[in-house]
Structures are given as C-alpha cells and as structure tokens.
Amino acid sequence: MNELVERLTKPQKVTIGTRLEDRLDDLRGQAERGYVFVKFTETRGGTELGVRVEPDASDLAAAQKGQGTITVVGKLILNYVRVRCHATVELPSLDGTGYLEVIEEVTPAQLAEERAKRGSES
C-alpha cells in the first residue's frame, strides 16, 4: 500500500482547509456544496484532501452556528487507493482529529474505465 495513505490511516491532527480570510464562512460554503477540504497537518507540508461528504454519515449542522463539533465523512481516491476520510473538528478553531479508512487499491486502468463509464452516462 502507498506509504502516505498508510500513515494517514492512524488518527492524527487535522484542520479544515480554507482559502478565505473568514475561515468559518468558507467552511459554511463548503458544507453547503457538500465538498469539504480536510488537511492532515502532520505530513511534510500538510496533506489537504477534498472530501465529497456522505450526508448520512456526516454532521455539518454546527457549521451554520460556528460553534460545536462537525463530523466529516466521505470517499476519495488518494495515490490509487480508494479511501473514506473520517474527521471530527471543533468550531470555531477548525482543528480536530481524523484518519483514512482504506477501501481498496485501484489501478490507473480501472480509474480510466470508471471515468469513461461516467462520461457515457451523461
């Protein structure tokens, strides 16, 4: 398995990745779009992942109030490994803990086939 993915399977510090000066406002926008940036801070330079939120497994309600705790759960592919990101973050600091759950390794050919299939369904 990929070394980075393996390192991120252990619980560690995370923060919500934001681009705007008003970090809570940026988080609110991410929550509304269902796509949240989670940054694992304990890697060289940090590893920021875009997570497509699984609504049934996540709880982003506190983002609207700017206080409390949010839970972000969602799938993505990192270095040809399909993973599910789990993060629990305190507001308003936007800091918390998270880890990756490995689902399966994929090959470039599998990814190309999946993309082609999605393209033909449009």
Image (cartoon, rainbow, N blue to C red):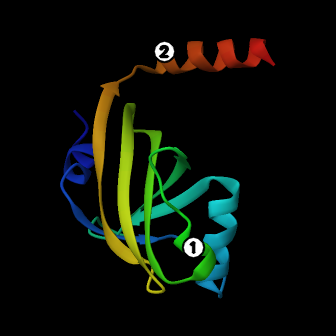
| Left or right of 61, for residue 39 | left
Q: Are marks 1 and 2 in contact (CB under 8 Å)?
A: no
- Residue 18 seen by the camera: no
x then y, percent, for residue 121: 76, 14
Does dot 1 land on a helix, a strand or a loop? Answer: helix
Q: Residue at x 39, y 32 (%)?
A: 82
Measure how far apart labels 1 and 2 are at the Cα level.
Answer: 36 Å
The amino acid type found where label 2 is placed reads: Gln
Q: Is residue 81 left or right of residue 22?
A: left
Tell me the residue at 76%/12% (across/down).
120
* Residue 113 image point, x, y percent: 58, 12
Query: What residue is rendered at 61% in x and 53% in y?
Result: 35
Residue position for label 2: 110
Q: Is residue 22 above or below residue 17?
A: below
Of callouts 1 and 2, the N-terminal one: 1
Q: Can residue 57 be seen at all in this image of the molecule? A: yes
Foreground mark, 1 or 2?
1
Q: Tell me which residue sits at (23%, 65%) in the image.
A: 12
Q: Quadrant of the C terminus?
A: top right
Where's the N terminus, which quadrant? top left
Identity, as a three-letter code, of the amino acid under mark 1: Ala
